[in-house]
Image (spheres, grey):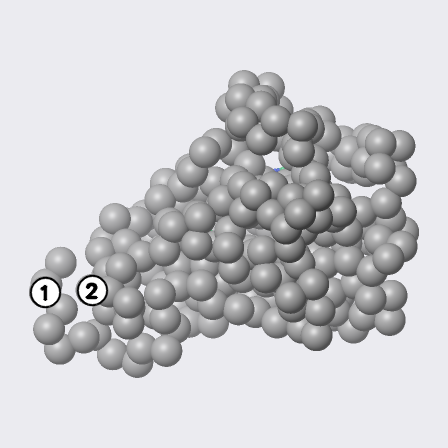
Amino acid sequence: GQGLMAGKRGLILGVANNRSIAWGIAKACADQGAEIALTYQGDAFRKRVEPLVAELGDRAHIAGHCDVTDPESLDAVFDGVAKKWGKLDFVVHAIAFSDKEELDGRYVETTRDNFLRTMDISVFSFTTIAKRAEPLMTDGGSLLTLTYYGAEKVMPHYNVMGVAKAALEASVRYLAVDLGGKGIRVNAISAGPIKTLAASGIGDFRYILKWNEYNAPLKRTVTPEEVGDSGLYFLSDLSRGVTGEVHHVDSGYHVVGMKAVDAPDI
Ligand code: NAD
């Protein structure tokens, strides 16, 4: 095969539909010759993921159901990958969850139950996936997760998810050290706001999109395809000297310190 990803095999977790960031990454990798396996979360998503996998033809297959709160489903996915491929070159973790009720209003109101569930699904899952991928990455590998600027600065309504993303970004650094000796790299993309299913749970999301359009240096938001192309850099050998990094793909929003003088009122 030809392309930046020729000969590479990767598992991608977190495709819900054709607007998912994980789907943007999957397409970018498949276009460059990667073979990919996709998981779905329950039967409701299977119906959406199956036609997407079909679009990629023989480059992609379904690795099965995966709910990260159910370790047996993770075992089954990794057993399946081990049987089919015997090794793994990359993994994409594009999974996050928090109760919608708590992505509105004040962070201080967060309940213990939702705090723990948010951390389990959005943070611990990346670590347990890294642990499962490690023995399969016999020629080294690349792990990539998705984060958001709400980890660094307070963003309206991001609340407990911001706290979880801060922990996820710290996990990237600890995992980079743990796995670096085996040539396994661990990085995150901090994506600007994109209208996906997960984002629809965040209060006033349209306002956040508009704010980014007016104030980001590129004066627009980013697309899943753009995040996918940046993902390609981390998953391919182009980034072979890079690990432990949190890379912003956000039209430059993170460098701005103040509302643009010419930004209209929203
Ligand atoms: P999405 O809804 O398309 O994807 C979220 C995925 O998480 C879904 O596929 C869902 O099945 C999966 N998921 C949730 N709970 C799960 C569980 N218990 N087990 C397994 N899978 C589970 O939305 P997206 O915006 O593409 O989100 C992907 C990642 O990108 C998330 O980590 C999100 O926080 C991050 N991100 C999104 C934005 C944005 O504005 N959309 C910005 C920065 C970072």
Residue beneath the point at 10% across and 63% down:
265
Mark 2 and ligand 1: say if the CB distance to the nearest ligand atom is below 8 Å: no
Give the residue type that dot 1 points to: Pro
Check disc 1 and report the residue beneath it.
264
- The answer to which quarter of the image holds residue 165 is bottom right
- Report the quarter where the N terminus lies: top right
- Helix, strand or loop status at disc 1: loop
- Crowding at dot 1, Cα within 10 Å, few <14 / some 14-19 / many 20+, comes out as few
Q: Left of 149 or right of it: where is 49?
A: right
For residue 83, side relative to residue 4 (left or right): right
Q: Residue at x 50, y 55 (%)?
A: 229
Q: Residue at x 78, y 33 (%)?
A: 77
**Outermost residue toward the bottom in this view:** 257
Residue 244 in the image: x percent, y percent? 67, 71
106 vs 173, left or right, is: left
Q: Earlier in the sequence, mark 1 or mark 2?
A: 2
Q: Is residue 77 visible?
A: yes
Mark number displayed over residue 211: none
- Image position, residue 218 (x, y; %): 28, 67
Instruction: Please say if 169 is above or below 261.
Output: above
Along the line of sight, which residue is nearer the eye, 185 or 120? 185
Please give the residue where the numbered disc 2 appears in the rendered image: 214
Marks 1 & 2, CB-CB < 8 Å contact: yes
Q: Residue 263, image x and y in percent?
A: 13, 69
Q: CA distance from mark 1 to mark 2?
A: 7 Å
